[in-house]
């Protein structure tokens, strides 16, 4: 049975709508879909919830429409809760929707919802949000919970790992992005912040909101200003020994795993044997010369995609084999020869002048 979270969420939404009347155009409104954790179970005030903390940290022009419902699982949202929330989101001019579900799906009460069913429900929710025209949908990985309890066990924990793989597979880089995935480990390492084995304490909620804010910046705010370029020119000459090196100022860990991450040229995903990648705080991609030599001459587009759905693209040129080597040979061999020839001519001229005298 669903608890009273929906009513409270609507009241919060109404307050936000009243606040936004004066300066609606400047507001960034984020809609939240979730269960009791996103709702803020156990807290005394709405401003202490993770959505409220996140929007507060993002800035004064950010507001939250929190429609999360205690006890809700993915099927509850797909079957009953989504449509009224979409209408409310539209009324509030929501542009970005954040979703965090799975904790109740993995519960004993829900008979450990199968991975395939969870995926179907999530895809259903996402597709309908896309059809409703929301610009971005951010999927959050739920935080860790303690087992065993009356409602969760070891099977629940294993299911959560599988559900996370589902989230990774739903990322499309167009409207669907992966938000936070660090909360799981943070709460696993700080079990004292889960006093009832499922819900965070006040500090835990604050930490969750902070992680969500960082994730929002990573997938929404930061990408337009992120530096990405060919480090030594965007031209490749056929049969050159100098390859193309592309650098993106985004942490390499976001490139190393996940289904969406990879390298594309002209929209075609490259096999990992066709490039080399490395990095730390930045990601560096080097295209193999053997691959570049097979590309048609002309302009091409390189795209580097990351696990969270963020991608960066730049154009490069493949040009005919350069004659630079020939020019160097002429300069290195021909110029000295011409110099010797010139000196001989001068000596002969002087000798001729001497004989005339």
Image (spheres, rainbow, N blue to C red):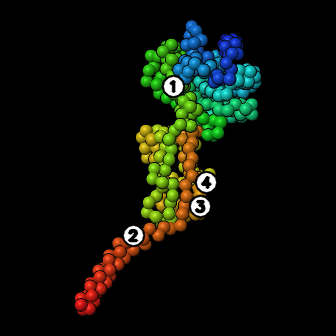
Local SS, label 3:
strand
Few, some or many C-alpha atoms within 10 Å of disc 1 (few <14, some 14-19, many ≥20)? many
**Mark 4 or 2, closer to the camera:** 2
Give the residue at x 60% y 21%: 62
Q: Position of residue 135 (x, y in %)?
A: 67, 32
Residue assigned mark 1: 211
Q: Is residue 250 visible?
A: yes
Point out the tag, 2 or 3, that comes first from the N-terminus: 3
Is residue 42 at all visible to an observer of this figure? no
Q: Quadrant of residue 23?
A: top right
Q: Name the secondary structure under disc 2.
A: helix
Above/below status of 150 relative to 161: above
Q: Which residue is mark 4?
A: 266
The residue shown at (73%, 32%) is 133
Quarter occupied by the N terminus = top right
Q: Position of residue 264 (x, y in %)?
A: 57, 51
């Amino acid at each position: 049975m669903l608890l009273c979270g929906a009513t409270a969420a609507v009241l919060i939404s109404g307050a936000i709508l009243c606040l936004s009347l004066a300066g609606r155009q400047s507001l960034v409104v984020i809609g939240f879909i979730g269960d009791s954790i996103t709702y803020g179970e156990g807290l005394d005030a709405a401003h202490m919830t993770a959505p409220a903390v996140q929007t507060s940290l993002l800035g004064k022009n950010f507001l939250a429409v929190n429609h999360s419902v205690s006890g809700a699982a993915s099927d509850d949202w797909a079957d009953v809760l989504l449509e009224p929330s979409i209408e409310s989101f539209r009324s509030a001019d929501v542009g970005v929707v954040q979703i965090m579900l799975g904790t109740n799906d993995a519960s004993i009460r829900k008979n450990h919802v199968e991975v395939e069913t969870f995926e179907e429900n999530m895809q259903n929710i996402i597709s309908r949000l896309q059809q409703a025209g929301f610009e971005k949908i951010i999927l959050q990985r739920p935080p860790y919970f303690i087992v065993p309890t009356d409602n969760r066990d070891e099977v629940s924990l294993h299911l959560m790992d599988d559900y996370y793989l589902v989230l990774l597979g739903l990322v499309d880089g167009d409207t669907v992005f992966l938000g936070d995935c660090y909360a799981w480990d943070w709460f696993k390492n700080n079990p004292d912040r889960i006093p009832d084995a499922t819900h965070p304490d006040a500090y835990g909620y604050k930490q969750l909101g902070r992680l969500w804010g960082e994730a929002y910046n990573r997938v929404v705010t930061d990408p337009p200003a992120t530096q990405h370029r060919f480090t030594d020119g965007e031209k490749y000459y056929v049969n050159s020994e100098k390859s193309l090196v592309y650098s993106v100022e985004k942490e390499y860990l976001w490139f190393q795993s996940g289904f969406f991450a990879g390298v594309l040229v002209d929209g075609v995903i490259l096999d990992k044997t066709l490039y080399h990648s490395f990095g730390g705080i930045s990601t560096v991609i080097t295209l193999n010369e053997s691959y570049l030599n097979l590309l048609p001459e002309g302009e091409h587009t390189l795209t580097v995609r990351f696990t969270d759905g963020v991608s960066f693209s730049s154009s490069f040129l493949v040009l005919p084999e350069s004659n630079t080597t020939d020019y160097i040979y002429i300069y290195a061999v021909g110029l000295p020869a011409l110099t010797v020839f010139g000196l001989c001519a001068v000596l002969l001229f002087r000798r001729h002048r001497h004989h005339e005298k």
